[in-house]
Amino acid sequence: MSLCVRRSLHKEVITLERDMRALQKEIAQHKMPYECLHDKRKLYDEADLRLRRHDCNYYLTRLHAEGDRSSQLLRWLIHEEWQHTLIGTIKLADGTMVSSQDAINDAFREYYTVLYQTQPTYNTQQLELFLSETPLAKLFSLNKEALEEPLRLEEINLAIAQIARSKTPGTGGLPIEYYATYSAHLSSPLLSVFEEAWARRILPASQREALIVILPKPGREHTDVRSYRPLSLLNLDCKVLGKVLANRLASIIHTLVHEDQNGFIPGFIPSSNTFLSIRRLLSILSDTPSEAYSSVALSLDIEKAFNTLSWEFIFATLKHMSFGQGFVRWVQTLYANQTARVKTGGLISESFPIGREARQGCPLSLLLFALVMEPLSAQLRIKNHTMGGPQDGDVSYHIALR
């Protein structure tokens, strides 16, 4: 019955396509008004929509009936997923091209092992001197006390409810939908695990491990391991803890970062921020005579910004912003002895250590990144005597972090 309906809908779509092509020829010869094509196009769109809805319902029904069985449909779905993640060849550091899936997986593992290791260009004394000379906002005592409070069950339940749905789970295999369904039974054990982790200053091994999947960057040479974007699929327990800490930090972060930085600040929309920055620049250019000064506008992007973020710099910045020992300890616990595996072509590598990175996928990472960008922003603001910059009344513009 379903096949007959589809054939009928498909025949209708094909017929309407043929009619539209004929009408286009007649319109080109000025034999028919253009409105006729518009009416025919409307009929075609309606028929095509009915066909697409029928196909969606058919495949959803089939997936519901056969998706969990070892059927031809399941084999086809697995094959399609494997084809999308398959990498044909990769160039090694010495220029050798490899096509074995084992060798390709090893190449990515070696690359990320090096990428995620700490490679500081400064020592601890230089870091402390830099931050001590930087005018950073300090945490108010009331806000500090709020961040230092023990975790509560309602915070865990709220975090579970807020984490985005339909996301691929990490190595634990359980999606957030499972946590949301059984949150009343899971929140108390999770609280106990987090409290023990805080006491030991480290999460359980299963919660510390991430699974890295890679996505090709458009317009890049796909034989280069650097042409792929790594996405860390975190354990859900770890994400819940990160979300609890992010909720606490989100309520006070606006007191710590300057108004020229709002890319990851709650309440600001990234696309809107970019638009406002461009509009401000155009306004300055149009309001200021060209002969008034010589200036240049630069748009800069930090290469692998999240992947190369130093944990030592994160902890030092929190300290200089007067965060309490309790909250800093939570962040240190979240990052202590992190490990990862990388998945390519259906293969999962051996585990390797992570020594730096604001883990993409962790709800806390965006806010921590905003905080550690504040020292750079502050240093640029205090150097206005050498940088100059356009004026709008008493305001001098130097930087906009989005």
Image (spheres, rainbow, N blue to C red):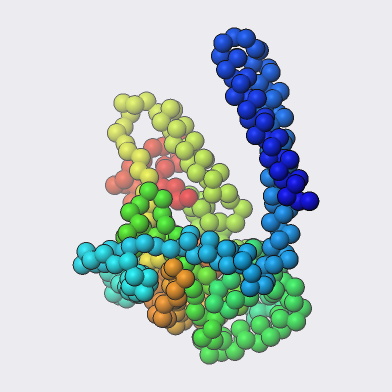
In x, y percent, where is residue 62?
A: 71, 61
Residue ID at (38%, 52%): 301
Q: Is residue 146 left or right of residue 275?
A: right
Q: Nearer the viewer, residue 158 or 209?
A: 209
Q: Nearer the viewer, residue 214 or 179?
A: 214
In x, y percent, where is residue 231?
A: 48, 65
Considering only vertical position in the picture, is 379 above or below 112?
above
Seen as rendered, the residue at the extreme top is 30
Q: Can residue 248 be seen at all in this image of the molecule?
A: no
Quarter residue 140 falls in: bottom right
Residue ID at (67%, 29%): 16
Q: Can residue 84 be seen at all in this image of the molecule?
A: yes
Number of labels in the image equals 0
Residue ID at (71%, 35%): 12
In x, y percent, where is residue 59?
A: 69, 56
Considering only vertical position in the picture, is 79 above or below 299?
below
